[in-house]
Image: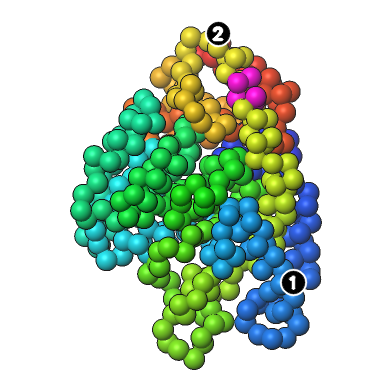
Amino acid sequence: MRKINTRSIINFDNSATTYPKPPAVSKAVAQAVERYGGNPGRSGHKLSMRVSEKIFAVRQQAAEMFGAQTENVAFTANCTHALNIAIKGIMQYGGHMIISDHEHNAVARPVYALSKTRGVKYSIARTGETDSETVENFRRLITPETKCICCTVASNVTGRLMPYRELAALCKALGICFIADGAQACGLLDLSLSDGFNFLCTAGHKALYGPTGTGLLISDGEYSLSTIIEGGTGATSALLEQTPFLPEKLESGTINTVGIIGLGEGLKFVRQKTPAVIKAHEEKLCRQLREQLSDIDKIKFYEADQKKVPILSFNIGDIPSAEIASYLSEKGFALRGGLQCAAVTHTTLGTIEQGTVRFSPSAFSTPQQVTALSRTIKKFVANN
């Protein structure tokens, strides 16, 4: 089997998972395996207490970063896990909810599943040309049965920002729960529960620079979730009922202590650099690529002029996006082709058959790497 030297691959698929990670993250993961072998919250012995303190410190970091109470930060396996807990916890007993037409399958699939198993009704709000038009499209779909609006903060396909503050205000005024998918925005925007989220779900392994297998479910405490997983929590263990206390209520089973400790260093990295600085750096690289490819008539960019996080999605003529991504991979560049797990979004964009090629840089990407990519794309176009 041919060995692949991952260090020779330039990663522009950071919307999926940031790579490389800050050195401190790798070091923390190694130390966690070597030094923090206990099970947090499960005993009073020193091994357990030592790791419990470490996990609590990361929970505090996340709470401070997103303006939450420490006990209202639950660790999950990823953003999808967090969204499932929030969506199913609110909608488990039926009702109506609204999502946007730019959702990832992490939102669309749980909602669809609930419509088949729990009788949940759902509507898809069209994204307008302006934020006010988008909010109005949500407003028109609200019925007396509407319990929840669940919306991405930023599209994972194009980076387009949804008017999340305005939607939060609408939900608050009408007593509707607001769940936000922050997977593409947390770490790039200064998001906080003060923006009006009832639940903010995010991944630890994307722009928070933590390891895979980590996520966060952050709550303002206003809504109590029905659990979709029950089990050992280390709290109220004499009762067969799931403990009502947060965050243990939402963290059944042994949590990913190694990943969470690594995530703590990712959070430190983002807070020290600041989301604004990271976002500005990545935006500059997106502008650079677009400008360097602007003279190619065959290239179409999607929603590039909208308010967005640093993601640039494009196609070259009618060539399948997967074919382009495969070619770029052979040349040493990792970009995401296809549907990016977002069928609803691609239906909206009219790219459900072709998909798109997604460029997403990170804090570690460089202008020199972008120039090398643009040259490679131009060679591809010249030969096709």
Please state which of residues 352 and 284 is positioned toward the viewer in this rendering. Answer: 284
Magenta residue span: 284-288
Q: Position of residue 282 (x, y in %)?
A: 64, 31
Q: Give above or below for 106 relative to 310.
A: below
Q: Position of residue 134 (x, y in %)?
A: 34, 33
Q: Give above or below for 328 relative to 5.
A: above
Q: Give above or below for 185 relative to 106.
A: above
Please state which of residues 321 and 79 is positioned toward the viewer in this rendering. Answer: 79
Mark 2 to mark 1 CA distance (whole Å): 54 Å
Residue denoted by label 2: 295
In screen coordinates, is 369 left or right of 181?
right
Q: Position of residue 152 (x, y in %)?
A: 43, 43
Residue denoted by label 1: 36
Mark 1 burial class by Cα count in 10 Å: few <14, some 14-19, many 20+: many
Q: Amino acid at mark 2?
A: Asp
Mark 2 burial class by Cα count in 10 Å: few <14, some 14-19, many 20+: few
Predominant secondary structure, magenta span: helix
Quadrant hosting residue 355: top left
Give the number of callouts.
2
Q: Position of residue 21 (x, y in %)?
A: 71, 46
Please state which of residues 319 and 59 is positioned toward the viewer in this rendering. Answer: 59
